Image: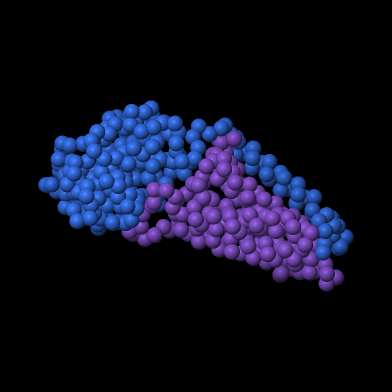
Chain colours: A blue, B purple
Amino acid sequence: MTQPGTQPSNGGRSLGPLIIGGVVFFLVLALVAAFALTGGGDDETTGSGNDGSTSSGSTSGGNGQTAEVTITGQALSPMPNTVQVTDASNDESVGTVAPTLTGVDFNGETVTIGPGGGPKVVMFLAHWCPHCQRELPVAAQLLADGKVPDDVEVYAVSTAVMPDRGNLPSSWFADESWNEPVLLDDASSSALSAYGGGGFPYVVYLDSEHRVLTRTAGEFGADVLEGLWEALAGK
Amino acid sequence: MSTETVNLFLAFLTLGGVAALAVATTAAIVAAATGARARMMTELGPYGLAMAFFVAVTAVAGSLYYSEVADFEPCRLCWLQRYCMYPAALVLGLSFRWAWLRFVAFGLAVVGLGVSIYHRLEQQFPDDIGGSCALDNPCSGRWVDTFGVITIPTMAGVAFALILLFVLLAHVADNRGDAA
């Protein structure tokens, strides 16, 4: 077996030191570049997005991607993490009044999702979830095409925020030309919990008195979304 | 050092690995056409195992950083890749003493590369319409997404491919040495 560092048998100049030097140089260059481009400081937030803020009534955090949420009312029953569209036959929350959510959007403007106004679509979306990443532009296009009944209000809730996973919610919603209100959930995803969130995307359909009509978990695409939105008209 | 810095550093290493794979493939084609293979094997071959070992140790270190320092919880497919990479690092270290162990490392890298490719495809093309993301830790989720393409399985896949390349290089060079 040939040993590392052995001189080549053909009498030419060995590439070994050159290779080792090149690897070391590249490592140093990569490290310096990484430090220079990121600042290199310690994390303000790490891991699962737990940045010290808590549920409703707490301070905001998450690099501006999460914020305090006030929740009023009885929480909905948890929905299992399976792709489904619920109705009264399989969802005990159908017919019950959903909690009122009060918080802010990315600009710090107050957003309230509660009784009053017309029927509502409340979409809970996670920025790191590929299904949400595909569903958001579909919903945005339906809205842009006027495929939502006039009396129906559509809200997005940015939840389950994990800044380390990239695709930060603030830029994500802007990039997808989402023009409807966005409520920021807190770092503990309290709003999602209060609404009994299942698998993402998680959508709760409410009538004008804020009672649950149906809930969906999973990605469904334009046709199903449009049908569910149309069914809300006049509710 | 922040996680963002580590992400970028490892992304640069991944890009370097991709470049090395591209250069090696091109060199092999050129060498086959020009007959320069013998010199290339003689020059690079003796460092093959050392470079494979270095790649594996770096991959293990990155993996441990993400799970133990950055608190990124490994998903099911991440664990499968770990089951290949961690023993591969150990086996490559031992293969300096027992050369036949390189074949074990080669096998582990083949399996690991397969899992990495499957995992990356899972991220790029999640389940069709009707799929959903679990609240906890889906394999289709991306803890790291640098430059919009370099995710953790991308890094692992490049590392496995480099290990394959370097082990192959060492093996061919040794065979040529034995034949001589």
| Furthest-left residue in this view | A234
Residue A34 position, x and y percent, is 60, 39
Q: Is B3 on the left or on the right of A198, as rendered? A: right
Looking at the rendering, which quadrant does residue A224 occupy? Answer: bottom left
Residue A5 position, x and y percent, is 83, 54
Quarter of the image with the N terminus of chain B in it: top right
Residue located 40% across and 40% down the image: A161
**Residue A162 can be seen, yes or no:** yes
Residue A74 position, x and y percent, is 24, 38
Q: Is A49 on the left or on the right of A36, as rendered? A: left
How many circles with numbers are drawn on the protein?
0
**Residue A140 can be seen, yes or no:** no
Looking at the rendering, which quadrant does residue A56 occupy? Answer: top left
Quarter of the image with the C terminus of chain B in it: bottom right
Residue A129 position, x and y percent, is 40, 49
| Furthest-bottom residue in this view | B179
Q: Is B116 on the left or on the right of A133, as rendered? A: right
Residue located 69% across and 55% down the image: B90
Residue located 27% across and 38% down the image: A181
Looking at the rendering, which quadrant does residue B4 occupy? Answer: top right
- Taking depth in this image into account, of A133 and A12 the one nearest to the observer is A133
Q: Is residue A88 above or below residue B7?
A: below
Residue located 79% across and 59% down the image: B97
